[in-house]
C-alpha cells in the first residue's frame, strides 16, 4: 500500500472513474469550443463583408442627402434627411467596428487559449 492508504487497485479504479471521465469531458469540450469558434469566425467573415457594403451604402446615402439632385423643397426636411443619414452612417460604422472587434477577440482567444 501507498502512504495514502489506498491499494493500487483502488487508486487505479479511482483514476479510471474520475480522471478519465474528466479528461474525456475536457477533450470533448475543447473540440466543441474550437468548432464553435471556427464556425463563428466563418460566419463573422461573411458578416464583415455585409457590414462593409452597408457602410459604403450609408456613406453614399449621406453624401446624396448632403447634396440632393433636386430642389430642396423644405429646409426642415433637408436637415431631417441629413440627420437621419448621419445617424445611419454612425450605426453602420459602429456595426462594422463591433464585427471587427469580435473577430479579433475570437482569433486571439483561439490562439491564446488553445
Image (spheres, rainbow, N blue to C red):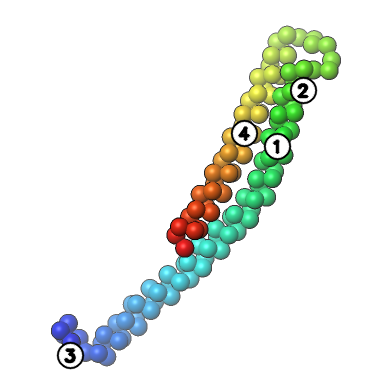
Q: Residue 1 carries which label?
A: 3
From mark 2 to mark 1, how far is it between C-alphas?
Answer: 15 Å
Quarter where residue 65 is shown: top right
Q: Residue at x 26, y 85 (%)?
A: 11
From mark 1 to mark 4, how far is it between C-alphas?
Answer: 9 Å
Instruction: Tell me the residue that label 4 is attached to.
Output: 93
Instruction: Tell me the residue that label 2 is attached to.
Output: 64
Compared to residue 78, the image places residue 42 above or below, namely below
User: In terms of secondary structure, where does tag 2 sit?
Assistant: helix
Q: In x, y percent, where is residue 58? A: 70, 30
From mark 2 to mark 3, how far is it between C-alphas?
Answer: 85 Å
User: In terms of secondary structure, where does tag 1 sit?
Assistant: helix
The crowding category of the residue bearing disc 3, from other C-alpha atoms within 10 Å (few below 14, some 14 to 19, many at least 20), is: few
> Circles 3 and 1: CB distance less than 8 Å?
no
Q: Which mark is residue 54?
A: 1
Q: Which residue is drawn at 21% across and 89% down?
A: 7
From mark 4 to mark 2, how far is it between C-alphas?
Answer: 18 Å
Q: Residue 106 carries which label?
A: none
Mark 3 or mark 4, earlier in chain = 3
Q: In x, y percent, where is residue 105? A: 51, 49
**Foreground residue among 92 and 107:** 107
Eye-nearest disc, 3 or 4: 4
User: In terms of secondary structure, where does tag 4 sit?
Assistant: helix
Amino acid at each position: 500500500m501507498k502512504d495514502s492508504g489506498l491499494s493500487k487497485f483502488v487508486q487505479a479504479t479511482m483514476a479510471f472513474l474520475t480522471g478519465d471521465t474528466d479528461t474525456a469531458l475536457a477533450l470533448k469540450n475543447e473540440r466543441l469550443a474550437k468548432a464553435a469558434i471556427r464556425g463563428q469566425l466563418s460566419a463573422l467573415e461573411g458578416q464583415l463583408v455585409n457590414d462593409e457594403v452597408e457602410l459604403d451604402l450609408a456613406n453614399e446615402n449621406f453624401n446624396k442627402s448632403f447634396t440632393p439632385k433636386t430642389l430642396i423643397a423644405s429646409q426642415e426636411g433637408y436637415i431631417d434627411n441629413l440627420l437621419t443619414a448621419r445617424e445611419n452612417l454612425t450605426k453602420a460604422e459602429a456595426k462594422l467596428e463591433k464585427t471587427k472587434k469580435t473577430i479579433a477577440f475570437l482569433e486571439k482567444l483561439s490562439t491564446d487559449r488553445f
